[in-house]
Image (spheres, rainbow, N blue to C red):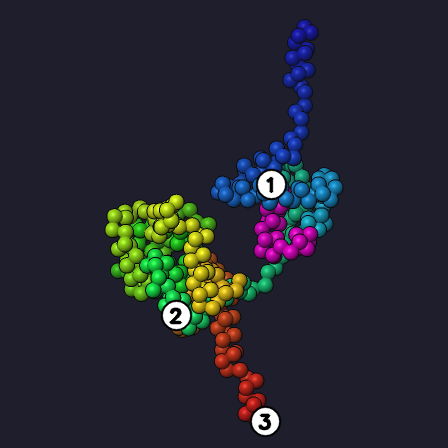
Amino acid sequence: MSGQIAKLETAEIVKAEPTLSQIVANFINAQDVKPSSRALYSRTIKQYFDWIAKEEIDLSHVTRVEILNYKQALLDEGLSPLTVGSYITVVRKFYEWAEANKFYPNVAKGVKTPRRKQQFLKQALTPESGKDLLQYFEHRAKRDFAIVNLLIRTGLRTIEVSRANIEDIVFKGGKRVLMVHGKGRDSKDSFVILTDKTYQPIRDYLATRPMAKGGEPLFTSTSNNSKGVTLTTRTISGIVKDGLKAIGLDSKEFTAHSLRHTTAVNILRAGGRIEDAQGVLRHSSPTTTQIYTHTIAEEMRIKNAPEELIDSLM
């Protein structure tokens, strides 16, 4: 009998409450996102709890006020509104999940991400600078010229160029296109048009790789240590940056991403609509593309400066 009682007592022992690390691990595992995003969530939520510990705040007593204080602390550190917004988004997701699983109340509900000013962090090239950049690369390595020419004429991101394979160049509706594995996408479900001016340098470059197969990267390394391997985004950015410096655009406002801005602005300069630029850049919302009109408005403001009208009077 005593043995049976002991078994019953053992079965009735209340399970220990999960630790914070176990709760966080369960939260991360419950997220239906890519492994890279899970890793980001893990780092981000750890930073939040490190701040909680540093401030000596009892987790059971966290309120909306603490979440707002955390947001302000991040901004005070000099982090950009975009970065702070991503951190707060993960904190909101955690508390939403924690409340659903009866760990903590959702004290982060309704906490807003910081508003960021709609402005260019990178400058678009003028038509003259764009021509100078292409002329600079035209007399250098065929690969580098093909890359820069592709970037400035299609608005592709460096990651999209890095992911491109030879076989991604296909025809749609009688036009040559490059299928694109976009940022945050799982497959190559979009495309950009390869006009003759865009494709010619690519064809010239591929002619230097006569044995290349369709499944190989469109652009490969020529380094002895990684010859034939796909180019990294860092290498692509470095190629563009070197060219920008060579034509006198040596500042942090001009990078490889400036060529994406240049594509959008050039579409508008040539009379295209916002919707046209949106389609090429593959923005989900026209609001994102709308910021490019600022460059056009600024150019017109400078070209037709009202202040100069005053000089004709006195």
Q: Residue 309: which quarter of the image?
A: bottom right
Q: Earlier in the sequence, mark 3 or mark 2?
A: 2
Q: Dot 1 lies on which element?
A: helix
Question: Which secondary structure type mostly characterizes the magenta part of the structure?
Answer: helix
User: Disc 1 designates what residue?
Assistant: 97
Q: Dot 2 lies on which element?
A: helix
Q: CA distance from mark 3 to mark 1?
A: 69 Å
Q: Amino acid at mark 1?
A: Trp
Residue 176 in view here: no
Q: Which residues are magenta?
A: 72-97
Label 3, residues with CA under 10 Å away: few <14, some 14-19, many ≥20: few
Q: Earlier in the sequence, mark 3 or mark 1?
A: 1
Furthest toward the top, the residue is 1
Residue at image location 37% in from the left, 63% down from the top: 137
Q: Is residue 90 magenta?
A: yes
Q: CA distance from mark 2 to mark 1?
A: 52 Å
- Numbered label tally: 3
User: Disc 3 designates what residue?
Assistant: 314
Q: Nearer the viewer, mark 2 or mark 1?
A: 2
User: Disc 2 designates what residue?
Assistant: 131
User: Considering depth in this image, is 93 or 206 the residue closer to the camera?
Assistant: 206
**Is residue 180 left or right of 99 when viewed as pictured?**
left
Residue 177 in percent (x, y) is at 32, 58
Q: Earlier in the sequence, mark 2 or mark 1?
A: 1
